[in-house]
Image (cartoon, grey):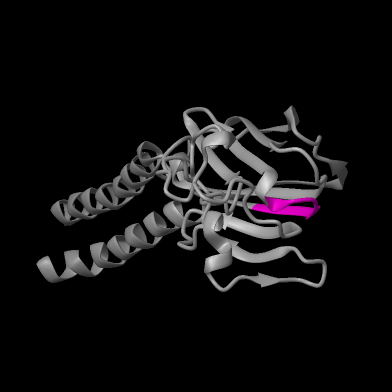
């Protein structure tokens, strides 16, 4: 009887494993928001530019956030930018290249970059990291966010990186988000040409657990029905 029971339950157990995997992977989602246009970042103006967007998806837990920036011209060492959502806060740029001996930072012309939590190359120090530029003089490639959560007048290469994109991991993706840009020093006007924010999120553990519990009920219920049938024989 044990052999016959395993022959019946075995396929159901494999079904449980397969459906559990589907419950975890199929519900993983990517939420993308983008903007394209031509908008000057006000020179040496604390009001800056702020973009707001919302994600409406219940019970999702962030595993990664990637931000792509397209900024042309100007003076890269002037620019400060951040992304915020709930308790998460990431400083994307904070006057790149600025050190205790270099007040103005890097003078290169613009960014066409993607910032991710998985990258290791600190964008604040990009000129020391074999950077690549396109034909327009923009820095290109994938970089780690600046992360220096201090006033732009106090951002140096040695400032601790306490506000990276990892700060969003584990938070719900749902709710309001803000992307902000500021030019923090006079002369050299940078132009924002576009941006995108890609948020990867998976189901909350409680929902995965409920799915597994429900599927397990199918398997157990099937086993009980089989045993009851055997007793009637």
> Foreground: 4 or 95?
95
> Foreground: 28 or 221?
28
Q: Residue furthest right?
A: 38
Using the rendered view, name the quadrant where residue 139 is placed.
bottom right
Could you tell me residue 21's position as x and y percent? 40, 59
Give the residues in magenta.
Answer: 68-76
Q: Which residue is drawn at the image coordinates 23% and 53% (left, top)?
A: 223
Using the rendered view, name the quadrant where residue 179 is placed.
top right
Q: Residue furthest left?
A: 2
> Foreground: 173 or 123?
123
Could you tell me residue 37's position as x and y percent? 87, 47
Q: Is residue 1 visible?
A: no
Residue 111 lies left or right of residue 97; in this view the side is right
Q: Which residue is drawn at the image coordinates 53% and 59% (left, top)?
A: 125
**Magenta part, dominant SS:** strand
Q: Which residue is drawn at the image coordinates 19% and 49% (left, top)?
A: 228
Could you tell me residue 69's position as x and y percent? 70, 52
Residue 211 lies left or right of residue 73; in this view the side is left
Could you tell me residue 224's position as x and y percent? 21, 48
Quadrant containing the C terminus in the rendered view: bottom left
Q: Which residue is drawn at the image coordinates 45% and 36% (left, top)?
A: 171
Using the rendered view, name the quadrant where residue 83 is placed.
top right
Quadrant containing the N terminus in the rendered view: bottom left
Based on the picture, tell me whether residue 32 belongs to the magenta stretch.
no
Based on the picture, tell me whether residue 73 belongs to the magenta stretch.
yes
Q: Is residue 210 visible?
A: yes
């Amino acid at each position: 009887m044990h052999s016959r029971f395993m022959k019946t339950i075995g396929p159901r157990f494999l079904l449980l494993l397969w459906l559990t995997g589907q419950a975890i992977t199929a519900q993983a989602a990517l939420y993308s928001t983008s903007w394209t246009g031509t908008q000057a970042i006000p020179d040496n103006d604390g009001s800056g530019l702020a973009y707001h967007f919302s994600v409406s998806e219940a019970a999702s837990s962030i595993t990664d956030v990637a931000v792509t920036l397209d900024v042309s011209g100007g003076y890269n060492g002037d620019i400060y930018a951040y992304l915020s959502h709930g308790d998460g806060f990431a400083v994307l740029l904070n006057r790149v290249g600025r050190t205790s001996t270099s007040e103005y930072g890097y003078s290169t012309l613009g960014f066409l970059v993607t910032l991710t939590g998985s990258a290791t190359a600190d964008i604040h120090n990009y000129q020391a990291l074999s950077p690549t530029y396109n034909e327009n003089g923009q820095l290109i490639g994938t970089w780690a966010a600046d992360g220096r959560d201090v006033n732009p007048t106090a951002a140096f290469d040695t400032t601790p990186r306490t506000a990276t994109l990892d700060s969003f991991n584990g938070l719900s993706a749902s709710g309001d988000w803000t992307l902000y840009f500021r030019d923090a020093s006079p002369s050299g006007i940078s132009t924002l040409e576009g941006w995108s924010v890609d948020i990867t999120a998976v189901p909350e553990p409680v929902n995965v657990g409920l799915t597994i519990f429900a599927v397990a009920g199918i398997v157990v219920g099937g086993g009980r029905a089989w045993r009851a049938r055997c007793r009637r024989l």
